[in-house]
Image: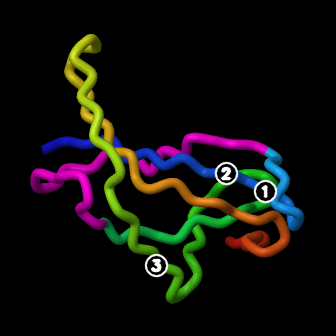
Amino acid sequence: MHYQFCQQVKIVDMDDEIISEVLFEHGEFETAALSIGSSVLIHQLGLREFSVVYDRREGKIARYQVADIEIDLITQPVVTRVYLEPVKLIVGQHDIGEMA
């Protein structure tokens, strides 16, 4: 099946004050049928300044659970979105810096 993977990301400062919340789109993938509670492996998320990006450094793989599956019957073609469990990134602790 064809899925669009998304994840709610809360960006906070060191005092746990919310700076922003974004819906990070991992992209569209063709995969076997999924259900809520399934797990997916994907690159860990990090921050480059205040932008959410993949942390592609070696060993930075994360396992996220599927929190919800939404089927949008209004749009054509039908879109199936998979929402992964939300994450919190702390400015200063999850910065990955510049990478080539």
Spot the residue most to the bottom.
59
Query: On the picture, is 81 further left or further right than 84?
Result: left
Residue 38 included in the magenta stretch of the image? yes
Question: Disc 2 vs disc 3: which is toward the camera?
Answer: 2
Give the residue at x 11% y 51%. Answer: 33
Tell me the mark number nearer the camera, choosing from 1 and 3.
1
**Residue at which label 2 appears:** 10
Q: Give, as a three-letter code, the residue at label 1.
A: Val
Q: Quadrant of residue 71?
A: top left
The residue shown at (28%, 40%) is 69
Question: In the structure shown, which secondary structural element does the residue marked by tag 2 occupy?
Answer: strand
Q: Which residues are magenta?
A: 20-39
- In the rendered image, which residue does mark 1 sit on? 12
Relative depth, front residue between 84 and 45: 84
Real-space Cα separation, disc 1 to disc 2, in angstroms: 6 Å
Query: Which quadrant holds the N terminus?
Result: top left
* Identity, as a three-letter code, of the amino acid under mark 2: Lys
Q: Is residue 65 left or right of residue 95?
A: left
Residue 21: horizontal and vertical position, in percent?
68, 42
Q: What kind of element bears circle 1?
A: strand
Residue that label 3 marks: 61
